[in-house]
Amino acid sequence: MNMISASQEQRQTWNALAQAWEHWGDAFERGASYVSRALIDSAALKAGDHVLDVATGLGEPALSIAAQVGRNGHVTGIDISEEMIAVARRRLGTVTNVSFVAADAEHFVPDSRYQVVTSRFGLMFMPNRQACLLRLRDAMTPGGRLVFSTWSTPDKVPMISLAVGFFVRELDLPPPPPGKPNPFCMADERAVLAELDAAGFGQARCERIVAPFMFETLAEFVRFSRDLIPPGIGAAIAERASPERIAALWTKFAEAAGRFVRADGTVSLPSHALCFSAQR
Ligand SMILES: C[S@@+](CC[C@H](N)C(=O)[O-])C[C@H]1O[C@@H](n2cnc3c(N)ncnc32)[C@H](O)[C@@H]1O
């Protein structure tokens, strides 16, 4: 059997999705920027800070932080997916105090210490999270701040769970194996606070925010959901249904998602995030 590690599976997944993420990056940021704002507020950034953004994806919140740390500060954004990093580099524009590096956060060896470590929707994809938290703590200066966001439970994050949940129910797809990294595996605030404590972080707290993910039309949200369906789920769907049935199911999905359409035709998907902060 062809076995690959959980991290390599993540790398393949996100490499496969990078082009679609580039296409949908602005639409995603309309909601996700609210989460960045909460993270940046609790990071208490100062000019000159050196910041590590873990699982930076297309470069957020690394790029939003760059302006706050000024010319003497620097942001290093790391991500396991070379394709996501390639998109992030394309989005750099004239920004000079950010570098993007393709690296696995669980094995990354920093060449300096960071005052702040951030991660927006990244830590839940680390298969060995406790080891990763310890490594991040080692990469921080004493008193340094760790800020990161996770998603709440699937019922509170329709922007992600609506399409996946629909196909799981319609085609009776098997649940993911227990313990496998997924967007919702850090939804339990108390469990995450205990993990931070066990990794030696102090003053840990959690702020809950609702990010207003918006789409201009129902058709736009259906395209977003279709383009970003995780490749593993896309493959399971293709195994169980003909292309005609899949097309019909997407039409049925659009009907089901109709309850999120507002009077003006836009789609509103308030999605609940947990924003954690802690100190080394
Ligand atoms: C949901 S995206 C978040 C991207 C970005 N921070 C944002 O909020 O838009 C999750 C990211 O985690 C990255 N990732 C998964 N496992 C990783 C690992 N072991 N080390 C570094 N990055 C990882 C993926 O490649 C992906 O880009």
Image (cartoon, helix red, strand yellow):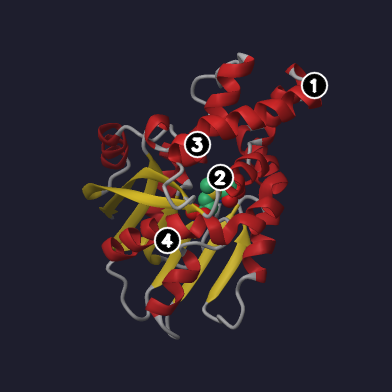
State how far apart marks 1 and 4 are (Cα). 38 Å
Q: Where is 148 relative to 188, above or below?
A: below
From mark 1 to mark 2, how far is it between C-alphas? 24 Å
The disc placed on residue 258 is 3
Q: Residues within 10 Å of mark 1 (few under 14, many from 20)?
A: few
Q: Nearer the viewer, mark 1 or mark 2?
A: 2
SS at circle 2: helix
- 215 and 67: which one is in front? 215
How far is the residue under mark 2 from the one under mark 3?
A: 7 Å
Task: Give the mark, 4 or 3, whose residue is nearer the N terminus.
Answer: 4
Q: Position of residue 227 (x, y in %)?
A: 67, 44
Q: Are marks 2 and 3 in contact (CB under 8 Å)?
A: yes
To which residue does mark 4 refer?
A: 33
- Pick whichever of labels 2 and 3 is earlier in the sequence: 2
Side of 233 where 109 appears, left or right: left
Task: Indicate the amino acid at tag 4.
Answer: Ser
Q: Is residue 3 visible?
A: no
Q: Which mark is residue 218?
A: 2
| Residue at (56, 31) in percent of width and height | 255
Q: Residue at x 39, y 35 (%)?
A: 186
Q: Which residue is mark 1?
A: 242
Nearer to us of marks 1 and 4 is 1
Q: In what element is the residue under mark 1?
A: loop
**Residue 208: image location, x then y, percent:** 27, 46
| Residue type marked 2 | Leu
